[in-house]
Every structure is written in structure tokens, then in C-alpha cells.
């Protein structure tokens, strides 16, 4: 096998693994009876998904933003506000740098809001949550809007929204 074909196969494998890791994260996020080990798996899967996406032949900056969102989301769900906020800020920076809008802009706001909730900063959580709702209302695709608000309305929000 020549190098070009080998590289292509490696890239395809990375693309597949990025998707597969993402599926595994969602399976664990939707499991109400997660163990501590499952939490560790989610973190590893989220980081691995982003790693593989960056090596995929279909990689775009939006994949990196969404990967950072996922890592932040996992840390937020696990209550690790410091790490959640670090990755939320990376997602936000990518959103601004590449001028992402619509669905991805709404999720960037949600990401920061949830990270602040996990950090115990209710003032910033509520501010970013309001921005997330406003951006969510502007999502053009009906199905994307439904997905976004479904995620926005899921716990944990800790005591931020009470």
C-alpha cells in the first residue's frame, strides 16, 4: 500500500473514531445511573473525539468548536466548573474567531452559562443563559431550534436558574 492510500485510510479511521466517541458520550450522558467510572469515560471520550476530529479529512473549525463545547458540557455535567469554564472559553473564542452564528452561537452561549453554573457563579450563569435563549430564538432551522432548546432545558443547572 502506498503512503497516499495509507494516509487516506488513517484519516477515514480518525473520522469514524471522532463520530464513535461522540456517540459513546451521548450514550453515557443519557444514562441516569452513571457510575464514577462512566464520568471518567465521558471525559476521555470527549477529548478523544476532538483529537480524532482534528485528524479527520472532513475537519472544519466548526468541529473544533463543537468538540470544545462537548468537553465543557461533560465537565459541567460532572460538576467540574473549572475545567468546564476553560473549555467553554475555548469554544467561545472559536465562535468569535470564525463568526459562527445560529445554532452554534446559541450553543456557545449555553456552554458558558452551564460552565458558570457548574462553577457556582449564578450571576454570570443567568446572564449567559439569557443570551443563549435569545440566540436560540433566532435559530433558523426548526429542528435545530428544537434540539437546542431540548438541551438547554436539561439539567444540571445546579441552583443557577432558581
Image (tube, helix red, strand yellow):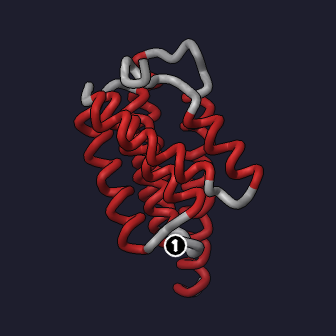
Task: Give the position of the N terminus as an image quadrant.
Answer: bottom right
Q: In front here: 26 or 45?
A: 26
Q: Residue at x 65, y 35 (%)?
A: 150
Query: Can residue 88 be seen in this snapshot?
Result: yes
- Give the total number of marks visible in the rendering: 1
Task: Give the position of the C terminus as an image quadrant.
Answer: top left
Report x, y in % for residue 43.
40, 37
User: In this rendering, would 145 be left or right of 75?
Assistant: right
Above or below, comparing residue 146 to residue 18 in the picture: above
Q: Residue at x 40, y 48 (%)?
A: 47
Report x, y in % for residue 69.
44, 49
How crowded pointer 1 is (Cα within 10 Å; few <14, some 14-19, many 20+) is rated as few
Report x, y in % for residue 131.
45, 47
Q: In front here: 51 or 106?
A: 106
The residue carrying mark 1 is 60
User: In this rendering, would 76 be left or right of 147?
Assistant: left
Report x, y in % for residue 98.
43, 74
In the rendered image, which quarter is residue 77 located in?
top left
In the rendered image, which quarter is residue 118 located in?
top left
Above or below, comparing residue 12 to residue 32 in the picture: below
User: In this rendering, would 77 be left or right of 141?
Assistant: left
* Residue at the extreme right of the image, as rendered: 142
Query: Can residue 119 be seen in this snapshot?
Result: no
Which type of secondary structure does the marked residue at label 1 adopt?
loop
Q: In front here: 33 or 135?
A: 135
Amino acid at each position: 500500500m502506498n503512503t497516499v492510500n495509507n494516509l487516506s485510510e488513517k484519516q477515514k479511521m480518525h473520522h469514524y473514531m471522532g463520530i464513535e466517541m461522540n456517540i459513546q458520550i451521548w450514550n453515557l450522558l443519557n444514562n441516569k445511573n452513571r457510575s464514577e467510572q462512566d464520568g471518567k469515560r465521558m471525559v476521555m471520550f470527549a477529548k478523544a473525539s476532538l483529537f480524532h476530529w482534528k485528524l479527520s479529512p472532513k475537519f472544519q473549525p466548526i468541529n473544533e468548536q463543537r468538540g470544545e463545547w462537548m468537553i465543557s458540557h461533560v465537565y459541567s455535567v460532572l460538576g467540574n466548573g473549572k475545567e468546564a469554564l476553560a473549555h467553554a472559553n475555548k469554544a467561545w473564542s472559536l465562535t468569535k474567531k470564525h463568526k459562527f452564528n445560529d445554532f452554534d452561537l446559541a450553543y456557545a452561549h449555553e456552554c458558558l452559562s452551564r460552565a458558570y453554573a457548574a462553577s457556582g457563579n449564578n450571576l454570570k450563569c443567568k446572564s449567559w443563559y439569557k443570551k443563549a435563549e435569545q440566540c436560540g430564538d433566532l435559530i433558523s432551522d426548526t429542528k435545530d431550534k428544537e434540539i437546542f432548546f431540548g438541551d438547554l432545558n436539561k439539567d444540571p443547572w445546579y441552583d443557577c436558574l432558581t
